[in-house]
Image: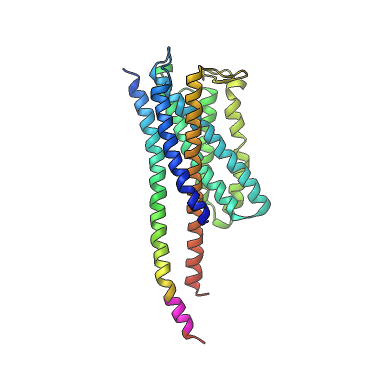
């Protein structure tokens, strides 16, 4: 535990440095897109946050399977914390996408397959978080694990929605790779790495905090019962 | 309207959401810290009261 704490501080410092580098590449290094203009720069936060939201829900999926298999509470904590972080990133995806759509599509929102499936994804995992407040604690972990596994079905549907249905959402990743110039591609990679650092900093901190909370609650119970 | 307003809005909302999350983490950590302090203070008393009983 102490070893992890010592590693977490340099990791968080590195996250800060990477974030500064990402901002430099977005605003100074990356060129301004010809047709969309500066608004295209939203793409550098929209794409990495979308990728990390999917990753968070994938972590929940794996942790939920592990919880049902091993019945170890650590996996329930990991799944729950990953959903919390994933919902934060998914919220950012919806907001930034909507802000980008206004000047480009002339609407804040349209019922496009990608937008609709992302909104369903967001509602699914918000429901997962609300589950903890409605269901009794002894039932919650099992139910949440099942929810975490079934809810993940939405992720591939959301990702492939632009290929499965007719959509107006831009397709960035094609069969031949990233559909953009090298400086833009480089800026996206740097931003993606920076957001990965941020995501794992947030997730690890959250998991540590939740584990510590459980430990304190257990100690309090022991002290109150006087064992 | 200049599109840079939208760009500014997108970036500021993103960072606000992230900072709210980090702020909530710090606040929970602070609450937990004070709870640990209370436990630390209560622990010697328990040990003392336990040692009185044979």
Residue A100 location in percent, x, y? 42, 23
Q: Is the magenta stretch mostly helix, strand or loop?
A: helix
Image point (48%, 62%), residue name: A216
Residue A89 location in percent, x, y? 48, 36
Quadrant (top left, top right, bottom left, bottom right) of the N terminus of chain B: top left
Depth check: give the residue in front, A33 or A189.
Answer: A189
Bounds of the magenta segment: B45-51
Q: Which quadrant of the figure has residue B30?
A: bottom left
Measured along the vertical axis of the image, is residue B38 above or below residue A132? below
Image point (39%, 65%), residue name: B37
Depth check: give the residue in front, B34 or A104.
Answer: B34
Residue A35 location in percent, x, y? 43, 12
Measured along the vertical axis of the image, is residue B25 above or below residue A220? above
Image point (58%, 51%), residue name: A76
Image point (43%, 42%), residue name: A13
How many discs appear? 0
Q: Which quadrant of the figure has residue A117?
A: top right
Depth check: give the residue in front, A186 or A117.
Answer: A186
């Amino acid at each position: 535990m102490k070893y992890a704490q010592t590693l977490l501080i340099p990791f968080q410092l590195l996250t800060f440095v990477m974030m500064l580098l990402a901002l430099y590449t977005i605003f100074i290094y990356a060129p301004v897109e010809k047709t969309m203009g500066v608004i295209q720069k939203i793409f550098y936060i929209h794409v990495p946050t979308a990728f990390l939201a999917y990753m968070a829900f994938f972590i929940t999926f794996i942790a939920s399977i592990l919880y049902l298999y091993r019945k170890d509470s650590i996996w329930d904590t990991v799944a729950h914390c990953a959903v919390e972080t994933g919902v934060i990133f998914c919220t950012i995806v919806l907001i930034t996408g909507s802000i980008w759509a206004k000047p480009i599509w002339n609407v804040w929102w349209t019922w496009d397959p990608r937008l609709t499936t992302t909104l369903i994804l967001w509602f699914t995992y918000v429901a997962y978080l609300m589950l903890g407040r409605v269901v009794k604690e002894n039932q919650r972990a099992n139910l949440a694990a099942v929810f975490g596994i079934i809810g993940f079905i939405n992720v591939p549907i959301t990702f492939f929605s632009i290929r499965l249905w007719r959509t107006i959402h831009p397709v960035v990743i094609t069969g031949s790779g990233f559909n953009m110039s090298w400086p833009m591609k480089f800026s996206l990679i740097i931003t993606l790495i920076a957001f990965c650092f941020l995501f794992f900093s947030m997730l690890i901190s959250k998991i540590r905090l939740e584990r510590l909370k459980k430990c304190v609650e257990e100690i309090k119970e022991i002290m109150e019962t006087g064992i | 309207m200049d599109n840079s307003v939208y760009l500014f809005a997108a970036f500021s909302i993103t960072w606000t959401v992230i900072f709210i999350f980090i702020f909530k983490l710090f606040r929970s950590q602070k609450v937990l810290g004070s709870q640990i302090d209370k436990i630390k203070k209560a622990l010697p008393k328990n040990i003392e009261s336990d040692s009185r009983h044979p």
